Amino acid sequence: MNKLYPRAAVGIATAALAGLSMAPATAITFQPPDELSPGASTGGASRGIIFEPPDDLSPGSTTGGASRDAQFEPPDDLSPSRTSGGASRESNYCFSSGEAPMSAIVPDISNGYTTAERPTFLAYIPETYAEEAFFSVQDDDGNQHYQATVPLPETPGVVSFSMPEEAPALEVGQTYHWFVVALCNQKLEPDSPLAIGSVQRTDRDAVPAGTTLEEVEALAEAGIWYDTVAALAQLRQSQPENTAVSAAWQELLSSVELDAIAAAPLAR
């Protein structure tokens, strides 16, 4: 499952753009219900925390966990300086060779749920000379809901992208698309590397906070992907020596075919 969108809307001319713990490890596994499972499966039964996507979140036919119609719309002040032609020499060398690709931390489902008004999104950023990224949240019509230029870490890893308190809240029941675009040449270009995901806010009651592995398990069982992965990332950040948390994190990412970056550090 490829979660890298290598070109940022070529031809778009229209603007709209971590206490040591001795507890046994808990496996957090993405396990779709039978009707959402791939046609062929291997291995034994999963154990521990199981992420259960709701029935209406069937695996999408597109990559990156985004809906078919999601398309990055650059705002006026970041519109590509080129609207046609091939990748520039500089963009080709934006990331170190041999690195896992830039990836949104999402499962292959059409949308992921969140209960947060302003959720946190995660993406793996490989080693790059890009110093900044453009972070954008857009509605289903391509209208900008929130946007910001954010600094990138100097070392590769999983990076969190959050909406601040002053940003408008996501509306319940509405689908949004989020984008992280590496500004390889300090500006947006048609071939700028792009990670993308889709999210829908739900108003489910009595959802746990996710401050313990047990609560993360409950979130996963409720099918709230973004709350599950963000809570587990926060546990990993605050308890870097907790082997149970580390194992749970790796199991979760591996279960959604992100094995290549499951051992990657949290960059911030």
Image (cartoon, rainbow, N blue to C red):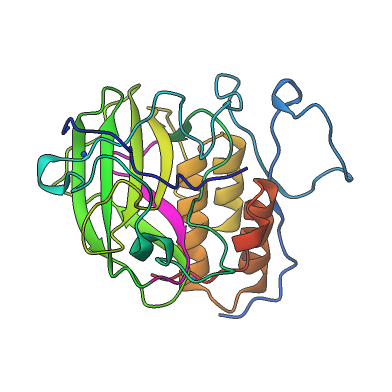
Say whether residue 161 is visible: yes
In magenta segment, residue 118: yes
Question: Where's the C terminus, which quadrant?
Answer: bottom left
Q: In which quarter of the image is residue 38?
A: top right
At which x and y percent is residue 12? 25, 33
Residue in the image at 58% along x and 45% along y: 2
Q: Looking at this view, is 24 or 12 the one in front?
A: 12
At which x and y percent is residue 52? 64, 34
Q: Looking at this view, is 194 or 223 the one in front?
A: 194
Q: In which quarter of the image is residue 185?
A: bottom left
In magenta segment, residue 195: no
Judged left or right of residue 158, residue 59 is right
Specify the segment rendered in magenta. Answer: 114-128
Judged left or right of residue 82, residue 264 is right
At which x and y percent is residue 67? 46, 27
Judged left or right of residue 49, residue 53 is left
Q: Looking at this view, is 71 or 254 the one in front?
A: 71
